[in-house]
Image (cartoon, rainbow, N blue to C red):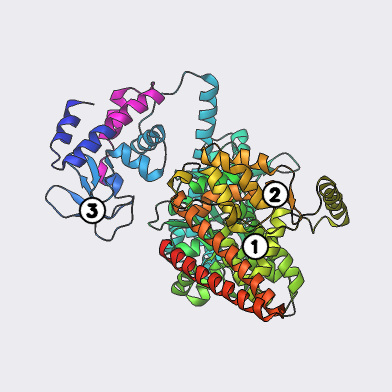
Amino acid sequence: MDVCALQRIIRINNPTARHLIINSLAYLRKKVFAICPLIPENIVEEIKNRNELVSVVEQYVTLDRKSSSNYFGLCPFHQEDTPSFSVSPSKQIFYCFGCHKGGNVITFVKEIEHVSYPQALQILADRAGIELPEPDDEAWKQKSERNKKLHEILLEAARWYYHQLADQTGLPAQNYLRRREITAATAKKFGLGYAPDNWDGLLIHLQKKGYSQDELLMSGLFKKAQRGNLIDLFRGRLIFPIFDVLGRVVAFGGRVLDDSLPKYINSPETPIYTKGRHLYALNLAKSSRSSNLVIVEGYLDAIAMHQAGVDQAVAALGTALTDQQAVLLRKYTEDVIIGFDADSAGQQAALRGLDILAGKGMNVSVLIVPDGKDPDEYIRKNGPERFKALLEKALPLLDFRLRCAKMANEMEGKLDIIGYQDQACDILAEQENVIVRELYADKLAETLHTSKESVIKEIERRIAAPGSDKKGDQLRQQLKRKQQELTRRQEQNNDQITREEIYLLVLLASYPECWQQMNEKPTPADFSSGTIRQLFIEALPLISEGKLDSSRLLDLAGDIVIRGRELKEILAKGSMQIDELLNNQPAAIAARQWLMRSRMNQIKLLKQKLEQELTNCEEQSKVHELRQKLLRISQEYAELREKFSSII
């Protein structure tokens, strides 16, 4: 770090900002020379000196001079209503008093563009017209030179298309944009252009610029005719330049101005363009202050949304969202709204996209545009505000999947209940969160006019045996053979078993220390008579010594079958769910709650048994005795309920 830079930092009044920036600059300086040892320090300094910070920041942030020395604006790195982002022209540093980000011009570009330090240097070097030293690798140099040439060709083509749109030649495209209500300012913002309806207009222009036939063919802008000569790929079409996240033209899309087919053609893949690795308009959307990004299907959908003030819109460059695009999105946000068309192809594309994005750990919801309209058409007919209201009502992933299942089973306004419940239960069986699963089971039960318990039971059956209804007789035979094998190993067991007993056992195995923390400890009488009580008795010595773990508990269960299911499978499932059920609650408190529930269950069963005996009893003396027992049991149950209420 040079002396002048150090002096500028020392003059910062805010000690937090000063400390942060000194550490940040020292770390980044060390990092860049670790990654790029071939870039001399004097060139890094020249890059900084020739990229005045205020002018760079103003490309992204509106700045006002609120003091004699500093500019202020709304911070681009976090949401705020009052400007706390400060830029010092004299010190050439920035600092936000809200989120505490700070640094120099290289730090700013690195953060705002979400790029590495070397990439930020390259962006600023290009802006200042400074050539960075290249590695001493001939193959790399050739590849770099080739890609640089292709970027030049595409940029020149974009300029040519843009001028054609503005000229008399572009009147058909100008009229088309007018009909689609795309303003001149929006067309300029997206660099829209026009390819005249002739065979070699662009070819002649680029040949005059000195580009070779091989270079032009590699650019993807031309194709070979039967005679071997090159012809323009785009003819008589509105042109959409496709930019990468750094704002470089990498490809084009072209749309016809009438109803002829194909409606769209796109650049083929080239050394600098792979369709599945880019998103249309992400170069603009990444600077949005919105916390989410909206993915739509078409160029004009994204453009119309930006024009309507929804500046976080991007287009997928094809209906199928790719893994690479999902990774790219994940760099900028965790919240994504998919807004594909409402036709069946659009719905299927949205479903595929949901799975890919959810697989990357993103929060996904789906924009539902009424009447099957695409976003562009809806905005033109209903206005920006109503469209923004639709975005606020975007459906969560699970709601959308259930909605699609319902639509797939509707015909002439009638719902096929059997088909819908089959698909819906499969969808909910895939949901790992038990609480969410039960909430949606309640909604599904209302639609099906059945009980929530019935729906949950069916979902749990599918979780236990996924796909069982889809493989038909073959799987049923397999299950039958398995059941016969289980029956041979042990006679059918119909002993009572409750959820509370399972959770209490797996909790004691998962958190051995909570046994010592419990004032009231479980006894065999707290468990249903038979299998589960016997399991607790066998586990008790290990529990009291703190030696029981989940694996040993499953070993103790052995090959026991209870109510048609292997006990160790039930315990294994409970063990996998226990942490989610605790939800950060201390294990000892949860154990006490489940113990109280288990005791209440046992008393309730005993009470039901006594009531049944009382109903069938004909001896007067016995009746009196049963009534006394029933009274004591009822009082005991009431006391337990009161005790349970005090600990939850």
**Residue 270: x, y in percent?**
61, 39
User: Label 3 amino acid?
Assistant: Ser
The one of 384 and 26 positioned closer to us in this rendering? 26
**Crowdedness of circle 3 by 10 Å Cα count: few (<14), some, many (20+)?**
some
| Residue 263 appears anywhere in the view | no
| Residue 539 appears anywhere in the view | yes
The tag earlier along the polypeptide, 3 or 1, is 3
The one of 363 and 51 positioned closer to us in this rendering? 363
> The residue tagged with tag 1: helix, strand or loop?
helix
Check the image and name the residue furthest to the front. 621
Name the residue that disc number 1 marks.
346
- Residue 463's quadrant in the figure? bottom right
Name the residue that disc number 3 marks.
84
Span colored in magenta:
25-54
The tag earlier along the polypeptide, 3 or 2, is 3
Residue 517 against residue 5 in the figure, above or below: below
**Crowdedness of circle 1 by 10 Å Cα count: few (<14), some, many (20+)?**
some
- Front position among marks 3 and 1: 3
Find residue 567 and name its label: 2
